[in-house]
Amino acid sequence: MTSNTENGRIHRRTGNRIALLGVAILFGVALIITFALLNHQSNSAHPENVTSLTPARSGEQGGQRVGAGDSTPGPTATIPADAVAIVNDEIVDLRRASIALVSDRVMAQLLDQPMPDERDILERLINQELLLQAADAAGFRHARADLDARLSEFLAQRNIPRAALIKALAAQGVAMEDFTSYFGDLLVADAFSRQQAEENGLTPSAYIDQLQADARISYGPAAGVALWNAVGDRADAQSSTKPPSTPAPTPKAASPAPPATPAASPDGIASAEHAADFTLPLIQGGEISLSELRGQPVVLSFWTTWCPYCRMQTPALVSAFQEYAGQGIQFVGINVKNSPTEVSSYMAENNMTFPVVLDEQGEVAALYRVRGFPTTFFIDSNGKIAAIKIGALTQETLEGYLQNLLK
């Protein structure tokens, strides 16, 4: 248990460093790109150097974000099919995520740097959104009027012709103005995270940890396969002689089929790690430890009552439990940070009869590096993580994962 806990902490620290917006990742490239341009606005927090209170977000043009006054879609509302995540009240959609991922890859290619791992894009986008929301709430003032000039200087310092960047982006369906907006969002997020870290005596990583702890993050339908497929389509287009047919990424329906093997999973991080043991109280009474279930496959699903995608997934889990419990697969729902009363009411409403435990402080969710909901772990009979699925499971996708566990 101790080694697994420490391993989880190490991975959390690593994941947060990967996700830091400007400090650790501008376009997926490490510390060599820590915004030389920011040296020219080191006093940007001072009133004389600012021009706006609330910068335009990359998503505000093209319908990528809902306004601050809009509420998170509830269980009876129409949930956007191209939603990658909902971060508090804001939707991060497939188009915005695709622009970020393509931009990272193009800059890595032009700078002759290793390609960023697309599986990090969700955490990076979520952390970027958290920082931008916090900046808005704090009335953070940051100059953006000279954004194009800063980008030009950034490119010049790295000997990247603007024409080469425009061509590389266009080949994958991303317009230069979208790239520039993404660049501006990164500048704001970077400057704000540095300011907050300094003012509060924290590291930027610790400050983002605080934002994550207080946030409501749920993964949308496009959180997995759709994003990678959309990017893959543009990569294919780049190698073709045909020009891109659209000026921006086009959402694509997620494939319902789970991967044949964990290593091939595009919408989860497959792992050969042993699942960390834990002991939590059961809503039904008593407690349960994961180690007690060793020798049987386990479906471990992290969820909350406020997550609209968890509500979408619940019927599939209830149905699968009724069908597969007799075949030896154990189902455990891990509710994170809701009250026992809320959980009990939700379970009664949805006819949930499989074991549900309460992770009241979110400690087990942190141990498993769960950033948003729902997140489901499929654990084999040897106690090893066979696959991880982020986002809502449908009856069909869940069926595939369960069949793999029985092999």
Image (cartoon, rainbow, N blue to C red):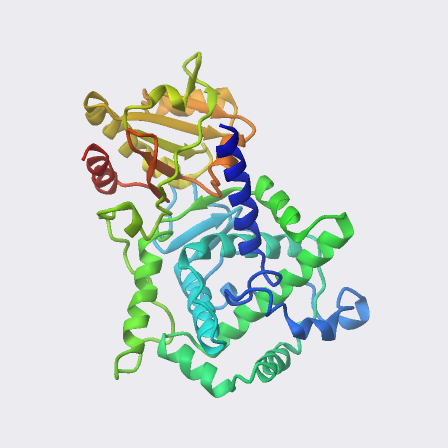
Residue at (43, 22) in percent of width and height: 345
Residue 283 versus residue 142 in the image, above or below: above
For the C terminus, the quadrant is: top left
In the rendered structure, the answer to whether residue 28 lies left or right of residue 235 reads: right
Foreground pick, 148 / 350: 148
Q: Where's residue 359, x and y in %?
A: 50, 27
Q: Residue at x 27, y 34 (%)?
A: 316
In front of the other: 362 or 55: 362
Question: Is 357 in front, or is 201?
Answer: 201
Above or below, comparing residue 283 to residue 228 in the picture: above
> Which residue is at the far top?
286
Q: State left or right for residue 152 relative to residue 162.
A: right
Q: Is residue 54 visible?
A: no
Quarter of the image for residue 44 reads: bottom right
Q: Quadrant of residue 378?
A: top left
In the visual, does 267 lie left or right of 200?
left
Percent coordinates x, y for residue 380 in the rendering: 29, 32
Left or right: 309 in relation to 255: right
Res 353 visible = yes
Q: Residue at x 56, y 70 (%)?
A: 183
Q: Position of residue 233 (x, y in %)?
A: 29, 68
Please state the horizontal and vertical placement of residue 296, each as a whole percent of the image: 28, 25
